Amino acid sequence: MIGDLKNGTVIEIDDINKTENKIKKWYRLDNAAKIYPATATSVWAAVFRVSVTFKDEIDMEKLQIALERTAKRAPAIAARVRKGFFWYYMEPLDKKPVLQPDVQNPCMKMSADENEGFNFRVRVYGKRVALEVYHALADGTGAFIFLKTLAAEYLKQKGINIPEYNGILNCDDQPEPEEMEDGHNKFSQFRINEKRTDKRAYYLKGTKEPFDEVHITTGILPCDQVKKRAREKKLTITEYLAGIYCYVLYKIQEDENPRRKRPVIISLPVNLRPYYNSKTMRNFAYFINAGINPNYGDFTQDEIFEEIHYFFKHSLNEKYLNAKISKNVSAERNPILRIVPRSIKDVAMNFTYKFVGDSRNTSTLSNLGLADIPGEMNDHIDRFDFMLGRSRFTNVNCAVVGFQNKLVINFTRGIKEPYVERAFFRELVKRGIPVEIESNQEVE
Amino acid sequence: MSYCVNCGVKLAESEKSCPLCHCPVVNPMDSECSPEKLEHPYPKRRDTIKNIIDRKFIISVMSIIYLLPIVICIAVDTLLRGRMTWSVISTVSVVLCWVIVFLPYLLDKELAMFYTSIDLIVLVGLFFSIAWYVGNYRWVWGIAIPTAILAYVIINVTVYGVSRGFLHNLYTGAFVLGATGIFCVILEVLIWNYIRRFLDPARNFEYWSAYVFISCIIIAGLLCYIERKKTLKRGLEKRFHI
């Protein structure tokens, strides 16, 4: 409530918001989201997960209230994706999502009748609250804002005062239109449309599991030690982990000794929000492909670190990123493509995804960075987790998030053999970084 | 807390073997661990997904493939003749193929009468498109449509008989053979009638269908006899089983 004391009038903030910040009934899918429903199958969809582990047992009633309030505050996530004739679209839902028990095989495709039709689910197990989101709605950063808000709201329901900063939304406020904006369309400047020229990358082989099977291996590392090792090489944590991951994959290919060596490429999502000061909760990331081509000769670990470091230096600036996203947006704006029925677009996008998209990287490494939360929450939270769902074609993916001194690395695997994460974590141990491992493997 | 002897990583209390190398954890102090410490990071409950074939996607791909000859034929025909002529026939033919092959696959339901009715409608459309192109509709009414309707009736009666249990085992084969014999007789009558009316009034009936009919009836009778004689049927099954 704000008041004009001189005139003695009082205006409800909610009333102002109701008139100024109207949330639409439906939204076009943003540029990055368009690929996800098109490539979804009857048994697979791109789903990822962020979770928070509290220090105390969870009060389910309070968490349910917090979830309902958070869902109302964040229509970007509290929505479902539907089919239009020409495009898919997103429809915020004015319903109440329900908490679900956790499962051994997370990030499975959501059915249309599940959770009141929402394309997200919140799952609880022990002290952990996990948010699984269909990628067509949001990216990791958007989902993380939702999770942090949910955690803050839950603590508020428990009577703990949590101020709203560091990405925490106030559930008493109305959603802001900026949170729903399509960053790709808004910020593409079309100065130059840069084509992707990536070649087919090395493919991690293995015994494929059915799509309802997923192997999760979690490594918990001390953040300070990883940072120290990275600093020694004058690298950031992302560069350091990407460098090690790339080296490990390179060595795996070397051991296989194939007739024709393929480039070892790691796909790294880049959060575009800081470049454009965007507050969107929807997809606003661009995947850059970093790696090495073994056909040039033998690479040492330090050479790979250098390759990754300078690739990051070169690629991560507004101008280059804008050229890349402009290319994608210009394709979407093509008038001929726009009038093609969705089912035909789906087929074309499927082929593109398989032969030009996923085949261009060996694996994905997604780093959400260090979780920024208000200091008042620190005493109540043990750790955060970030996990990619099974990819449709690439067999192993990796996601990283840090909180306080815990750096949590989750490997998601769609094949039986754990040789990639084994090599990765052994490499870290070899470098003097202690690793604690847990997994979703069945225990009799 | 245990360490994997192979990997050197610290393993969570819940892990009974190293998730990286499957090396079993042998910890003499294990018995001292309190049960609550052994809580596994994931529950046993699993999400299940029905493994449904993505029919819509397959149909979409195949439809695009089917669409290509239609587009090419229409484009070539229109370019050469300034309007659609023979391309109408090729278009309806492709549609007929699509309807026959993909409609049952798309709907995935046992609706024989519905599918055959749609097939019949499109087939009649094909007859008319050919008749329009050649400028002669008499054969459509005189031969094509009656033949198509006759085939439609035979197929649906057979399906109905099988679904209701009137026809089973060798009786089904006998019925189909008998119906084929009758079909050939009626077809010859239709053709003879058409030729006599429009082409050659002096044309005699040739009785070729009689050979087919008699052969079909003999084999159909034989099948019925075998079906009735169980011992004979079992003996034949034993000798000729595949």
Image (cartoon, helix red, strand yellow):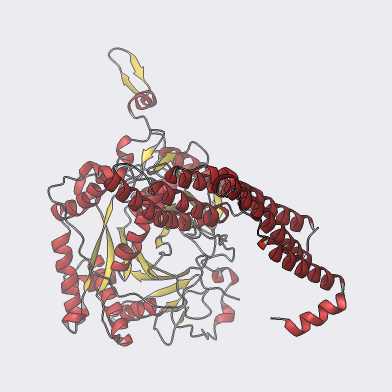
User: Where in the figure is residue A377, as x and y percent of width and height?
Assistant: 39, 51
Say whether residue A62 is visible: no
Q: Is residue A199 left or right of residue A407?
A: left
User: Where in the figure is residue A317, as x and y percent of width and height?
Assistant: 15, 55
Q: Is residue A438 left or right of residue A170?
A: right
Viewer-side residue, A239 vs A436: A239
Say whether residue A399 is visible: yes
Q: Is residue B63 left or right of residue B74?
A: right
User: Where in the figure is residue A349, as x and y percent of width and height?
Assistant: 35, 55
Viewer-side residue, A309 vs B154: B154
**Quick one: quadrant of the N terminus of chain A?**
top left
Q: Residue furthest top?
A: A7
User: Compared to B231, does A124 lie above or below?
Assistant: above
Viewer-side residue, A202 vs A216: A202
- Residue at 81 percent across and 58 percent down: it is B166
- Residue at 37 percent across and 38 percent down: it is A27
User: Where in the figure is residue A93, as x and y percent of width and height?
Assistant: 47, 38
User: Compared to A214, does B79 lie above or below?
Assistant: above
